[in-house]
Amino acid sequence: MCRVPFSTRSLLLALVVGSLSLTHAARAQTPTVPEPTEEGRKRLVARRTTGRLTIDGRLDEADWRRAPVGGDFVQARPDFLPTTRYPSEVRVLYDDENLYVGAFNRDSAGLSSLRMPDLRRDFEPPENDVFGITIGPLGDRRTVLQFSTTPLGSQADVQAFDGGDAFNFNWDALWRVRTTRSDSGWVAEFSIPWRSLRYAPGLTTWDINFVRNTRRVAQWSAWMPYPRQLSSWRITYGGALDSIQPPPPRTNVRVRPYVLGTRVTDRTARAFNGQTGDVGGEIIWAPTANSLLEATVNTDFAQADVDRQVVNLTRFNVFLPERRQFFLENADLLNAGGLGAGTIGGIGGVSGRYFVQPFFTRRIGLGEDGTPQPIDAGVRYAYRTGKTTAGALAMRQAALGSQGAATFGVMRGSRFFGRATRIGATAALRDGDALEADLDVVSRRNVVVAMDALTRIGELVQFTGMVSASNENGRTGFAGTYGITRNTNTSLAGILGAVVTRDYNPQMGFVSRPDVVMTNPFATWTMQPAWLPSRVVWLRHGPNGIAFNDPQSGALQESNLTYSGEVLFRNGATITPSIEHNMQRPTVAVPLFPNVQIAPGSYGYLRAGLSARSDQSAPLAATLTASTGAFFDGALNRVEVVGRWSPNPYVSLRGSYEINRLRSLGTRDSSFTTHLAGPELRVFLNPRVQWSAFYQYNTAAERASLNARFSWEFLPLSFLYVVYNDRQAVQGGNTPLARSLIVKLSWLGQL
């Protein structure tokens, strides 16, 4: 049985005492959004078009002029107010092919007031002027699609589930938007094909909401109000779109072939050098409105964003997010719960410190060091209704060098019960070869099963849990995670936890570190006293404790107790001070860097930090993060600067620089400094044509790399890419190691 040590109980006690002492001070006299009721929902009627619409961002056709208007927007953030100084008017039309939404966003400040740092697709909504549509077409009040744009017509789309418990920013749907701008405001005209939506047949009323960000004042407004600690993805707070009559679901077949040419120069031993060509692609078939079947042959990811390098100063494996488009599509259907990037983040919550994921797509087609592995073929199935979801994926990875071929498979299903309960089950298999430490390639079969659940009490309290088991060559391991949170507009409190045994080894998943009991209580309070200056929105503060203990003895392995504060300004800038106490108790030597080992023992130390973030929508923006204090048996001073200069939305120069100065560290009393630099340049002709170059220089990994990419979206979701990669060794004057030039043409066609 796992023992809970005194140190964890102390963390919990500290949070309870802090909560009781600060409850009165944390009360905020701000208006609150009423609980959603059917009687309180706004309603907007959708009208069928009588003529042809030209998508040009003008809304001057007769159909637009006759359409019912949705108005009376309210302020949703930073505080709820029943009116807004920046009103919007929305109309909805449809025909047999498309759903149309037109919006006029009034703003008397004129063109110079609009904020758009650049023209990227899937831009960051908080840093732009934005208008967005949140649609719930299944009627389950759990599944939403959101389509957003900026005044210059950049596109962003996202799938979100259970109010944002799971989401996929990298989902790319087939749709169009055009915009126009004037001194009185800006107009957005959307055209969304029915084939890009999944909707319940026969449903004539959809859940819907419309949101807008007026960035120069950092104010979000909405057609239907929602609590500021949530988002418009919580569609239970949405309104109703009546009289919508989409066509009956039709068989929908799309093809996405590609042709690719590559020139490679690689000095690595036995590496390929020369020219090669390749073809492949995908077939996407939607036999019903609720199901989707995709087949891929010779899958290629040449255009995928490169991984951002990190300097790992922890005792954990580094988690790198998935960036390949094929695996990002419908990723939520295979999400087996656990702890990870989708858990609560930010001040007061776990922010990516510990991950337990029974299934993680980066284990397919990528080596441990991120080297691409060829994928011969694969198939994926997705099914979604208002009560049930199901997904399956099978991939065949070809052999490459010392890595043998492997077959991957995963299946998952989930069922919704009542108003806010979901139960899911997952099974994953990896069958193939693997390289052992003695360089022998052996056959390995790894099986992982998991069950997970989510439920809510009202709209503010949420419970999550997951149990999982893995088996490989007769060795069975177990893992479990849980989370309890209560999130209001003035406070956030909860506890996250995990138990992972030594033999838990999901070859198709990710675990930051096995053989631990993790406990993470946290709380934060938002204060808005009357004495705050008008340019300050709130003061936010709270403790966050995380402890790792041995599952058998209960002995503490390490812990961190942080108390953070945040000052939020009206323009979106923040100042965040923090102080933390760390305890490290390794029982074996810890290799932090090459030739740097931390001896077994007990290390307790304090660190202090400060983060300052300017208005990120301004032409010149920066974030500075600095910390100082002890580190194990030595000292660490760390500074990271991230900046961006955008003289206009068509040119954006970004850069980051991190320096870690370590002193008297480890068994050799080592002192050294690491540098990690990452400048990036993006140039746009329009939202569909761009060129970018990203360089990374990492002295800790002794690696430097350049990734330059030109992309042209000549038709919706059809692209021409030209990609140049250059990898160098830092030592010896940046010695070239490998270079490649890739030209790829990808076309999406409807059959």
Image (cartoon, rainbow, N blue to C red):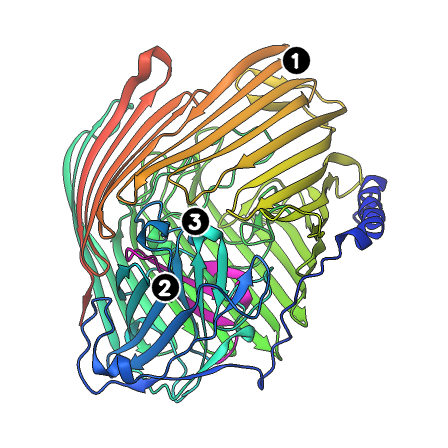
Q: Eyeballing the image, is 418 above or below 375?
A: below
Q: Eyeballing the image, is 534 above or below 88?
A: above
Residue 73 vs residue 478, the one in the foreground: 73
Residue 320 vs residue 22, the one in the foreground: 22
Amino acid marked by disc 1: Thr
Mark 2 vs mark 3: give the one in front. Answer: 3
Image-based side of 530 in relation to 210, left or right: right
Q: CA distance from mark 1 to mark 3?
A: 46 Å
Q: Which residue is mark 2?
A: 380
How packed mark 1 is, by other alpha carbons closer than 10 Å (few <14, some 14-19, many 20 or more), is: some
Q: Which residue is mark 3?
A: 127
**Element under disc 3:** helix
Residue 228 in sight here: yes
**Element under disc 1:** loop
Amino acid marked by disc 3: Glu
Q: Which residues are magenta?
A: 139-168
Q: Which mark is residue 425?
A: none
Q: Quadrant of the C terminus?
A: bottom left
Quarter residue 266 falls in: top left
Residue 675 percent across, percent down from the top left:
46, 21
Q: Residue at coordinates 33% horizontally, 28% vertically from top-left? A: 705
Residue 653 percent across, percent down from the top left:
33, 34
Q: Which residue is mark 1?
A: 667
First in sequence: mark 1 vs mark 2: 2
Q: Is residue 165 magenta?
A: yes
Amino acid marked by disc 2: Arg
Image-based side of 62 in relation to 454, left or right: left
Q: CA distance from mark 2 to mark 3?
A: 35 Å
